[in-house]
Image (cartoon, helix red, strand yellow):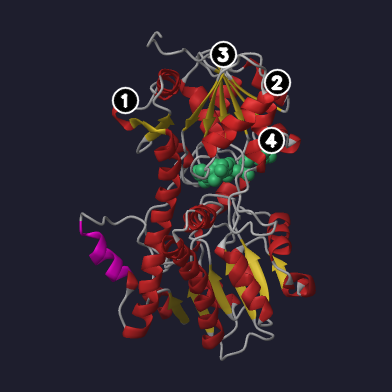
Amino acid sequence: RSTKPTRIKKICCIGAGYVGGPTSAVIASKNPNIQVTVVDYNIERIEAWKTDDLPIYEPGLLDVVQAARDGDSTKRTPNLFFSTDVDRCIAEAELILLSVNTPTKSLGRGAGHASELSYLESAVRKIGEVAETNKIIVEKSTVPCRAADTLRDVLAATAKPGLHFEILSNPEFLAEGTAIPNLLNPDRILIGSLKTPRGLEAAQALAAVYGAWVDPDRIITINLYSSELAKLAANALLAQRISSVNALSAMCESVGADIDEVSYAIGLDKRIGSRMLKASVGFGGSCFRKDILSLAYIAESLHLFEVADYWRSIVDINEYQKDRFTRRIVRCLYNSLSGKTLAVFGFAYKKNTGDTRETAAITVIDNVLTEGANVRIYDPLVKESQIRQELNSTTVRLNCAEKQLTVCESAYEACTGADAIIILTEWDEFSNRDEPMRRDSGHGRKTDERAERKLDWTRVAELMRRPMFVFDGRNIVDAAALEELGFRIECIGKA
Ligand code: NAD
């Protein structure tokens, strides 16, 4: 067989979410000769991608989307499209990116915490049914080890005879909130393939797509199953660092140490490094918990029970941290939240995203509502409907506590008459530190202006009841400065 790489001209990305949208936009913007179409059966999402009010928020995303989708002043021809015509786009593409969701399974006897692969299976069935030509199929979704075998099996049973489907693993490592810089300047691009001539050829074709902007040294081609496992492992290790630091934060609070100082000291060791060592109320987001539980499930299915327990302990510490934080709030507020008002600053699972999946805010708010508190939530980006939907779908208690909950338009509205502020997202707006605000241009949303505004803590103090508490679940405030204004500050990992 020839070793000349196949030149890809048409890509179809199935799944227009946090991964599929930004990844496709960057691929299209860097490969003007490739037509990239993102498909989804969610009509509302696809229609939003065609406007400037994109369905997801990422700093810098709109610029990249507009350049590829609408063309630009250099008379660039548009090459990024969004469509619900899944069949046609699959049929026309040579390379298909699978970017569908793979959440933790919630139903079924003995399902444990396996990944739900039904979305992936249904996407691949569709490929089998409509394909008239050979395809390269790329797992961008995070999948369990050997998911490629499942996909191959589904294709063998559904596709027309004589067609060839080469499965690649190309996991996505972007972090929400920094997706565009992560995609433009990735630490590495991992491409896993079978070590067959066809597998290697497909890997080369995908490498050529990334080669348009990524240094060849950073494009790593490895074994298909190593690549699948490496993605789960990377997320597990990132989460493990957070849980390790959070476990240390509990000790700091008891022994009079300061977790920020401990993390700083640890991070100076070059073998460890300083990133992902920030203590917090706990990690959230759609990936860490799900991927660790998937890893634990795989270990268990291999009868590696101690290994499974090890991975699960990372999730357990995370749950413990959220509950510990709530217990501290109750303790400081004289052991009762009944009739007290708590202003919650931030609902997104991290700053610079509107994503609220598995945000620590859900657990903390649920806990304090149960203790009888009135909760006034403010997030610069997340809309009231999304907050209520998230809380309703995950908390049983909210139905009887609806009147305890208010979603506010500003931080000042939230803290009016409040006994305490609980910071749950590290939005720059909430910090009273002096670091320069990063201004992201061109993502074109009114809410961005709000996200970039700094809070006037003197005004906050005027609005609150006495005594005034701040429970900083992200360690973003300068406690000494706020104490001068009369606040009592409780930070994570500080006595
Ligand atoms: P998402 O829920 O935002 O998007 C998935 C999209 O796929 C949805 O819009 C859904 O409607 C669509 N979809 C599902 N099945 C479909 C089908 N058969 N046909 C057409 N469309 C279909 O999910 P996401 O956050 O983009 O994550 C996608 C995958 O990427 C997951 O496996 C996740 O673990 C992984 N991942 C996510 C991130 C992240 O930060 N969000 C980072 C790295 C990897």
Determine which residue is flagged by label 3.
Answer: 77
User: CA separation, marks 2 and 1?
Assistant: 34 Å
The amino acid type of the residue labelled 4 equals: Ser
Query: Mark 2 against mark 1, which lies toward the viewer?
Result: 2
Q: Nearer the viewer, mark 1 or mark 3?
A: 1
**Residue at point 27% right, 64% down?**
264
Q: Is 366 drawn above or below residue 427 in the view shown? A: below
Q: Residues within 10 Å of mark 3 (few under 14, many from 20)?
A: some
| Quarter location, residue 419 | bottom right
State yes or no: discs 2 and 3 in contact (Cβ < 8 Å).
Answer: no
Report the quarter where the C terminus lies.
bottom left
Is ligand 1 within 8 Å of the beta carbon of the residue shown at mark 4? yes
Q: For the residue with label 3, is its CB less than 8 Å from the closest atom of ligand 1?
A: no
Label 4 sits on residue? 122
> Which comes before the other along the chain, label 1 or label 4?
4
* Percent x, y of residue 86: 70, 26
Question: Element at badge 2?
Answer: helix
Within 10 angstroms of label 4, few (less than 14), some, or many (20 or more) residues?
Answer: some
User: Dominant secondary structure of the magenta stretch?
Assistant: helix
Q: Amino acid at mark 2?
A: Val
Q: Badge 1 local density, few (<14 within 10 Å), some, or many (20+)?
A: some
Residue, disc 1: 216
Q: Tell me how far mark 2 sits from mark 4, CA to CA.
A: 12 Å
Between 60 and 361, the one nearer to me in the picture:
361
Residue in front for this viewpoint, 377 or 157:
157
| Furthest residue in direction front, as rendered | 303
Find the magenta span and give its range: 260-269
Q: Position of residue 365 (x, y in %)?
A: 63, 71
- Disc marking residue 114: none
